[in-house]
Image (cartoon, coloured by chain):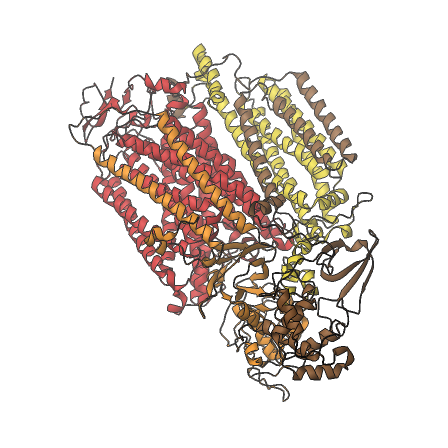
Chain colours: A red, B orange, C brown, D yellow
């Protein structure tokens, strides 16, 4: 706790803002496609990640909407006189690809790979991540993995496209869609499934390595490249979140890799580790899979929590409350997250002893999460809250995460989990946590750093409206699923008893509403990119280091690294105007920079 | 000790379905206990957010009061309280789970045999059916096996769920005290994704009074009829009906209509001039041996006795248009007189006939 | 290249929150020759050791010894070949953390698969906690009392017995089997008397009528459902117990190499390597087939002949009426 | 965690503070580092973290190994004793240890700018790796000729649908359609524990029967039915573990060759030997994993 003492006597921020002329920032530093594909600059890599990940998000979203549409009627195949076999298979493919693409290609890389790459080094005061080449490699690996999934996708589209017109046997080699569920449960995935399990698992395998390399890179960067004054307890909480995430990425992902390799081996060579027909044990597969995939949930949520910590404090103009507790709770969650995987297997025939142990540890994870929520709420106390778009998302995050976390109590308790397991209650729960919370943090962060990354301001009101639409849509889509689940609606069902139809109707309506909101968001960003106003270096008055350099940042982030102190001493900035944003207190507002000439604001 | 859901009637109505088993009580109690905790904390957080957002919203000219950066006392408080709460919840969950885990020794065991995509329930005396009947007021233990992939067994009204894992023998037990209303059985759902027919893999469970249950068991365990009728019975009770149609419609497996005696093509290997007993027998015992063209092998090997296989073959023969019943055999659908060794209860080919013991009296 | 050009005039960020000696950059320590050689020899030595130990049969200890040696060897490699001895401790910490999580993973997975033993029963711990403990098989002789639903008090039994209308009529042992059956078929019987006889004659000692009881003989609670309109079967079972033996109630006799007196009873089940037998006292024994020296089945039932000798035809019919009433309580 | 890392930057600062002029002119210094030491340390930390992931990846296979060995100890005794040659295994261990030594020596040479020694050591290491692969190939070919390969090409490969409770022996001796309803009540309650014996319920984890074969070696026929099903599984695990390790050896050879080429160009000196050190670490990890694989696979007796 010595660091807290440091924070007390933190010197006012050195405002060594170095304005490079606009035509020399990382976007304009080099020209040409090659300069992007082979770039070693962490910001450009982040941008490339952003493009790819968001396009995969679009694909996953389209699947989501289409399967919600199929669920509008409890008996879609009969109602429209469709080929039953075909419709069911199609639905299974839709929810599987929705899950697989969203989890492996969107949620996991979204915040670490996009925002981590864009922001981490600047926030840390470094010129780049520790291993720029490795960073570029992880991007390429991600692309390769994505191609595997695209291949599976294409295979599915071809197969079912032709099947609809009576040619059921058109297949790409080993790639007719994917119908195992994103969990690849054996023995279905290793024996019965006729779909493209091998390419899909290989894809996830490859993407996993991209995630590992990112983790290696971030951990090394955070350990070695911390500049003068950046002690561990002066690191912004977003970096703590990324640090915890990286730990999970490097410790858990290799196990996923070996698991998927075993699935491929099982399917191609019948090695008999998971398939009971040749002496294997399906439950062992679940141990393997969830040893990665439960910590993966924290890969998704921890950086999101980091983002929220930044947003809350900046937009309530107030020092974050309980810095140490938030920081340590991130690490605690990361480590405890490794000890709870078995709560995915309470009804799978796991031994009662193991069930009980896992249930107990699961509850212990609830505590640091609760601590975070209370700290964020307390940060608002006596603030001066500005409801900019990022702040709306942050508040939305807190609510959704509260719901998601609390409903986790039902599933962590052994006896109540029994009726709720594998029902829509679980679906709603993890969408509230993974989708709701993580997506809200992601959008909030995107809005928050948009001016810094692109040097353009988005349209505020549109952003706020979109935020509300997304929030309403989300709750309308997923809250009814809690009720449906409690009433007994099992997950992954293409057709279902009629009594659940009403909930599905609401859910689908909400999904569409949310889709609409997201389209507004996209429109807002594209419009901002094309003709948004020029962004000031510090539009929000944040005090973390990325706000100490120009927007967009120069190629090397900092020529002279600013002295670092308490990242949340927001009092050091004062608001000037839309054009100039916030500037260090006690300094005359800088004259507007004439085009093509740089002005240094000195302290 | 149970907090009755009707404390919050609205909630009670929309959440859990009616509780029909003895294990449901504690589970529901814990559910509503947690639910009230959730409601409290959610509105606590919501209230704080709204209050703070309003009181401390940005107003030009309004200066910002001093606020603490941290308060260890506060931190410890809101670390300690959730800890206590989760420990309490864990305890009750653990307790309820143990009651679920250990069946009483006198439980009535029923074997649940799952395959893609249907259930088969085997009663201790060997009777087999595709729907579950259980005696009221008596502990029942289900022994869950799967023939192929992982399936699930879920009865919402009983608050019971267990995966059916091939190679393992998961068990669950419960006791249902109230017989179900006539024709209103509870649903059985498959909750573990098992492929194409996952969402159509459903069955029903009926709670009978003791005497009705005895009658039911008697009825299904003494089905007697000429071989084709027996074959039809097996066709219905052994889940063939799930994948093979008898009216020519294409389902997961080839239809049985007009199969007998007609040529058939295979995915690999020479074409079979005419379907015969040998081929059918092989297809039942080793479904993967010959796969009919345009179909894929999702059928698990069936464990039928020889006479049962012959009965199925006899039934399949009757399904071809050019089938002429031998003069000695009776029409398959009509009532069949039982051999003298069997109880003199007139039974029809389908198990849905009148309960036997009614006709005996 | 441009980067290098630029890097020259850039005063790069440096860490200030750290201490340490600047002269030997960590990990850049050149390992002395003798240490390299020494470690190498040690490694070879331990390889020989582990192979040698494997030849000795220590039972389960073998694997632990082998693992212990392997740990020693690996730590030698890590410490000296991989420089951890001189390197920053954190690098070693990374490796240890990785090992720790592997141990965690293996440990818990093993815990589950181990816990999920071959025996179907949940572990005792859970049985005690949940209070559902299976019944202790009753020792020979002492029979647990079994109750008929609404059983009669001894007084009522005696009363019914004393006022048996058929008193004085010829008893069964004086008649021919066929006459008894024919007469009994004609008689409707009195189910209350039947109940009394069922208790008095001690049928209830073996035949259960409540499924909650552990049966020592065929369950009679629904016998007339199983044999509808077939009183002859019942009569025969009473008069000539060994004529038809209910399936599953053939008496098996096993002589075991391990004990003197044979085990006698009903064969409950048989697996690839075991028999399970329940004797007339309800005691259940399971023993491996390899112990069996002699196995034969008795042609006769455990139910002794002539239990009904002193009864009359009316009594016999009454017992049937009683059993029938058990199967159809509705027809009160 | 923080203290450990903080000692990292130390050298960097100190070194930088000493203001060695040559630091900034080092041709190998990337723009975002301030001193070669900092760069060196981050490289090493990164490598160690990566090695950690390698350990966890193999950890998955070790987990499968442990679970199946615990469930089927006799299978492992039988298969390892009859089909794995301790001699070849031990030979390979020695070979790998030696190559580890030469690699470590190579690093030493690089640190002392003895390029000739470095090249010799690297060549020796390469030869060691090649030798290891040769021995492995011999073992694999033997397995191939003995028909104990992976999956169906394994002579012990048994594929039958999972045993179902209904098909267990006890049900066959229950009356077929019983005249005896209590066959289902008390009887079945008694059946359960028995049926779960050897070869019965949960064949995956059934304890092998207590009949002890300690005196003479196991034969396949002496294995419990449940175990016989898993002999092929042992070979699957064997091939997966050694195969994945072999792949790492091949990758290592590639890396060493790359280092050798760079050494030929004389790129390494006491100023800059990071690549040699990192490849060294990788190679030692490969050795490390084998140190565990050898007793676990070859020394089961």
Q: Is residue A576 left or right of residue D45?
A: left
Q: Quadrant of the C terminus of chain B?
A: bottom right
Could you say which is closer to the camera, residue D80 or residue C238?
C238
Residue D134, image x, y percentages = 70, 38
Residue extending farthest to the top is: D18
- For the point 33% across and 23% down, which residue is it? A558
The image shows a total of numbered marks equal to 0
| Relative side of A440 to C189, left or right | left
Image position of A548 with respect to D81: above or below: above
The answer to whether residue C264 is seen in the rendering is yes
Along the line of sight, the residue nearer the viewer: A257 or B31? B31
Q: Nearer the viewer, residue C193 or D2?
A: C193
Placement of C326 over or under A255, stated as above or below: below
Question: In the image, is residue A590 above or below residue C308?
Answer: above
Instruction: Name the residue located 62 percent from the left edge and 39 percent from the top edge.
Output: D62
Residue C41 in the image, given as x and y percentages of width and height: 72, 22
Q: Quarter-wise, where is residue A306 in the image?
A: top left
Instruction: Give residue C22's position: percent from left, percent from top.
Output: 49, 13
Compared across the picture, whether A518 is left or right of B112 comes to left
Percent x, y of residue D295:
70, 35
* Residue projecting furthest to the left: B61
């Amino acid at each position: 706790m010595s660091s807290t003492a440091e924070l007390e006597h933190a010197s006012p921020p050195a405002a060594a803002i170095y304005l490079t002329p606009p035509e020399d920032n990382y976007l304009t530093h080099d020209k040409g496609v090659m300069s992007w594909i082979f770039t070693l600059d962490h910001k450009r890599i982040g941008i490339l990640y952003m493009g790819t990940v968001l396009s995969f998000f679009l694909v996953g979203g389209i699947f989501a909407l289409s399967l919600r549409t199929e669920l509008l009627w409890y008996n879609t195949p009969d109602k429209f006189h469709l080929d039953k076999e075909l419709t069911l298979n199609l639905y299974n493919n839709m929810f599987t690809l929705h899950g697989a693409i969203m989890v492996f290609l969107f949620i996991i890389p979204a915040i670490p790979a996009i925002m981590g790459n864009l922001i981490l080094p600047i926030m840390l005061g470094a010129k780049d991540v520790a291993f720029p080449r490795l960073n570029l490699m992880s991007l390429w690996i991600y692309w390769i993995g994505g191609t595997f999934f695209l291949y599976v996708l294409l295979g599915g589209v071809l197969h079912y496209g032709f099947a609809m017109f009576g040619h059921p046997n058109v297949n790409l080699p080993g790639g007719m869609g994917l119908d195992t569920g994103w969990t690849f449960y054996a023995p279905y995935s290793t024996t019965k499934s006729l779909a493209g399990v091998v390419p899909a698992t290989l894809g996830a395998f490859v993407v996993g390595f991209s995630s590992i390399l990112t983790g290696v890179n971030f951990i090394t960067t955070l350990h070695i490249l911390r500049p003068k004054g950046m002690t561990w307890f002066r690191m912004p909480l977003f970096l703590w979140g990324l640090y915890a995430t990286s730990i999970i990425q490097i410790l858990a992902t290799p196990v996923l890799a070996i698991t998927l390799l075993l699935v491929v081996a099982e399917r191609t060579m019948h090695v008999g580790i998971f398939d009971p027909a040749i002496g294997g044990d399906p439950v062992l597969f679940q141990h393997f899979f969830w040893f990665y995939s439960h910590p993966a949930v924290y890969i998704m949520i921890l950086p999101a929590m980091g983002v929220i910590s930044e947003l809350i404090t900046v937009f309530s103009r107030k020092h974050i409350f309980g810095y140490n507790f938030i920081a340590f709770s991130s690490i605690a969650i990361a480590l405890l997250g490794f000890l709870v995987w078995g709560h995915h297997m309470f009804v799978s025939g796991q031994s009662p002893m193991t069930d009980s142990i896992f249930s107990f540890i699961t509850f212990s994870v609830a505590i640091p999460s609760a601590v975070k929520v209370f700290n964020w709420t307390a940060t608002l106390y006596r603030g001066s809250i500005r409801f900019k778009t990022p702040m709306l998302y942050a508040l939305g995050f807190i609510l959704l995460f509260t719901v998601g976390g609390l409903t986790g109590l039902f599933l962590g308790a052994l006896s109540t989990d029994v009726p709720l397991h594998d029902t829509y209650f679980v679906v709603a729960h993890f969408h509230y946590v993974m989708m709701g919370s993580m997506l809200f943090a992601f959008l909030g962060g995107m809005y928050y750093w948009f001016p810094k990354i692109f040097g353009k301001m988005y349209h505020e009101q549109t952003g706020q409206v979109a935020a509300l639409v997304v929030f309403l849509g989300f709750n309308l889509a997923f809250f009814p699923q809690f009720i449906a689940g409690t009433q007994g609606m099992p997950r992954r069902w293409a057709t279902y008893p009629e009594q659940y139809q009403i909930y599905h109707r609401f859910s689908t309506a909400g999904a569409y509403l949310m889709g609409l909101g997201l389209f507004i968001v996209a429109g807002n960003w594209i419009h901002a990119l094309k003709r948004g106003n020029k962004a000031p270096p510090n539009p929000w008055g944040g005090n973390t280091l990325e706000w100490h350099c120009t927007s967009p940042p120069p190629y090397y982030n900092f020529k002279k690294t600013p002295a670092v102190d308490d990242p949340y001493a927001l009092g050091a900035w004062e608001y000037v105007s839309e054009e100039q944003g916030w500037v260090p207190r006690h300094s005359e507002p800088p004259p507007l920079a004439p085009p093509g000439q740089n002005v240094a604001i000195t302290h | 000790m149970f907090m009755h859901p009707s404390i919050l009637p609205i909630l009670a109505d929309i959440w859990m379905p009616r509780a029909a088993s003895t294990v449901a009580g504690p589970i529901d109690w814990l559910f509503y206990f947690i639910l009230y905790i959730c409601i409290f904390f959610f509105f606590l957080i919501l209230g704080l957010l709204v209050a703070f957002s309003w009181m401390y919203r940005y107003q030009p000219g309004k200066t910002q009061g001093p606020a603490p950066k941290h308060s260890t006392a506060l931190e410890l408080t809101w670390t300690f309280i959730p800890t206590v709460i989760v420990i309490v919840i864990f305890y009750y969950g653990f307790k309820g789970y143990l009651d679920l885990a250990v069946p009483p020794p006198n439980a009535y065991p029923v074997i649940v045999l799952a395959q893609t995509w249907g259930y088969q329930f085997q009663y201790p005396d060997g009777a087999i059916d595709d729907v579950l009947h259980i005696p009221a007021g008596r502990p029942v233990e289900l022994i869950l096996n799967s023939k192929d992939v992982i399936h699930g067994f879920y009865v919402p009204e009983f608050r019971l769920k267990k995966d059916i894992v091939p190679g393992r023998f998961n068990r669950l037990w419960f006791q249902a005290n109230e017989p179900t209303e006539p024709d209103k059985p509870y649903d059985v759902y498959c909750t573990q994704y098992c492929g194409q027919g996952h969402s159509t893999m459903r069955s029903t469970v009926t709670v009978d009074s003791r005497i009705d249950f005895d009658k039911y068991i008697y009825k299904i365990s003494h089905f007697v009829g000429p071989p084709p009728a027996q074959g039809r019975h097996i066709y219905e009770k052994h889940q063939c009906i799930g994948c093979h149609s008898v009216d020519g419609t294409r389902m997961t497996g080839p239809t049985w209509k007009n199969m007998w005696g007609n040529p058939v093509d295979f995915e690999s290997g020479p074409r079979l001039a005419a379907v015969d007993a040998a081929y059918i027998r092989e297809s039942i015992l080793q479904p993967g041996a010959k796969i009919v063209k345009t179909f894929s092998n999702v059928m698990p090997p069936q464990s039928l006795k020889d006479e049962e296989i012959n009965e199925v073959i006899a039934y399949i023969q009757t399904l071809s248009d050019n089938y002429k019943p031998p003069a000695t055999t009776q029409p398959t659908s009509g009532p069949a007189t039982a051999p003298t060794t069997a109880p003199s209860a007139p039974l029809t080919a389908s198990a849905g006939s009148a309960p036997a013991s009614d006709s005996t009296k | 290249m441009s980067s290098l050009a630029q890097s020259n005039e850039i005063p790069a960020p440096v860490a200030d929150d750290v201490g340490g000696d600047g002269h030997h950059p960590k990990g850049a320590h050149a390992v002395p020759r003798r240490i390299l050689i020494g470690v190498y020899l040690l490694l070879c030595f331990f390889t020989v050791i582990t192979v040698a130990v494997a030849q000795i049969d220590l039972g389960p200890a073998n694997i632990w010894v082998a693992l212990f040696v392997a740990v020693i060897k690996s730590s030698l490699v890590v410490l000296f070949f991989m420089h951890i001895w001189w390197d920053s401790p954190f690098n070693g910490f990374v490796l240890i953390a990785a090992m720790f999580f592997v141990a965690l993973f293996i440990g818990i997975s093993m815990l589950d698969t181990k816990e999920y033993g071959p025996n179907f029963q949940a572990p005792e711990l859970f049985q005690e906690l949940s209070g559902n403990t299976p019944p202790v098989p009753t020792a020979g002789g002492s029979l647990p009392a079994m109750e008929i639903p609404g059983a009669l008090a001894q007084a009522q039994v005696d009363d019914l017995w004393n006022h048996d209308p058929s008193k004085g009529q010829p008893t069964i042992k004086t008649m021919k089997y066929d006459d008894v059956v024919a007469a009994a078929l004609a008689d409707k019987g009195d189910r209350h008397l039947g109940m009394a006889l069922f208790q008095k004659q001690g049928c209830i000692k073996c035949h259960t009528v409540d499924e909650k009881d552990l049966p020592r003989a065929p369950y009679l609670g629904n016998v007339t459902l199983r044999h509808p309109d077939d009183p002859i079967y019942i009569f025969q079972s009473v008069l000539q117990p060994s004529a038809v033996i209910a399936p599953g109630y053939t008496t098996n006799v096993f002589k075991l190499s391990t004990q003197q007196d044979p085990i006698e009873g009903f064969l409950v089940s048989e697996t690839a390597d075991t028999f399970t037998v329940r004797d007339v006292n309800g005691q259940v024994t399971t023993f491996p087939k390899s112990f069996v020296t002699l196995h034969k089945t008795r042609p006769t039932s455990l139910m002794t002949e002539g239990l009904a000798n002193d009864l009359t035809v009316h009594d016999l019919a009454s017992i049937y009426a009683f059993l029938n009433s058990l199967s159809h309580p509705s027809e009160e | 965690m923080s203290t450990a890392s903080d000692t990292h930057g130390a050298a960097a600062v100190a070194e930088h503070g000493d203001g060695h002029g040559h630091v900034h002119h080092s041709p190998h210094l990337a723009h975002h580092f301030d001193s070669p030491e900092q760069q060196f340390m981050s490289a090493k930390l990164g490598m160690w973290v990566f090695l950690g992931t390698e350990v966890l990846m193999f950890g998955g296979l070790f987990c499968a190994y442990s679970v199946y060995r615990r469930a089927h100890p006799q299978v492992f005794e039988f298969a390892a004793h009859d089909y794995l040659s301790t001699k070849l295994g031990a030979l390979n261990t020695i070979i790998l240890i030696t190559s580890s030594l030469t690699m470590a020596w190579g690093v030493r040479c690089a640190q002392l700018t003895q390029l000739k020694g470095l090249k010799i050591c690297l060549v020796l290491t390469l030869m060691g790796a090649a030798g290891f692969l040769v021995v492995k190939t011999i073992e694999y070919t033997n397995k191939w000729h003995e028909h104990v390969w992976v999956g169906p090409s394994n002579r012990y490969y048994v594929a039958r649908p999972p045993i179902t409770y209904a098909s267990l022996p006890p049900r066959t001796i229950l009356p077929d359609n019983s005249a005896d309803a209590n066959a289902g009540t008390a009887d079945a309650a008694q059946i359960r524990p028995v049926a779960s014996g050897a070869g019965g319920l949960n064949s995956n984890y059934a304890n092998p029967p207590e009949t002890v074969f300690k005196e003479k070696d196991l034969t396949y026929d002496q294995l419990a039915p449940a175990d016989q099903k898993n002999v092929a599984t042992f070979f699957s695990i064997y091939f997966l573990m050694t195969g994945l390790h072999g792949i790492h050896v091949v990758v290592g050879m590639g890396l060493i060759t790359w280092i050798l080429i760079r050494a030929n160009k004389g790129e390494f000196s006491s100023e800059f030997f990071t690549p040699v050190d990192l490849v060294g670490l990788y190679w030692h990890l490969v050795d490390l994993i084998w140190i565990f694989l050898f007793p676990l696979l070859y020394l089961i007796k």
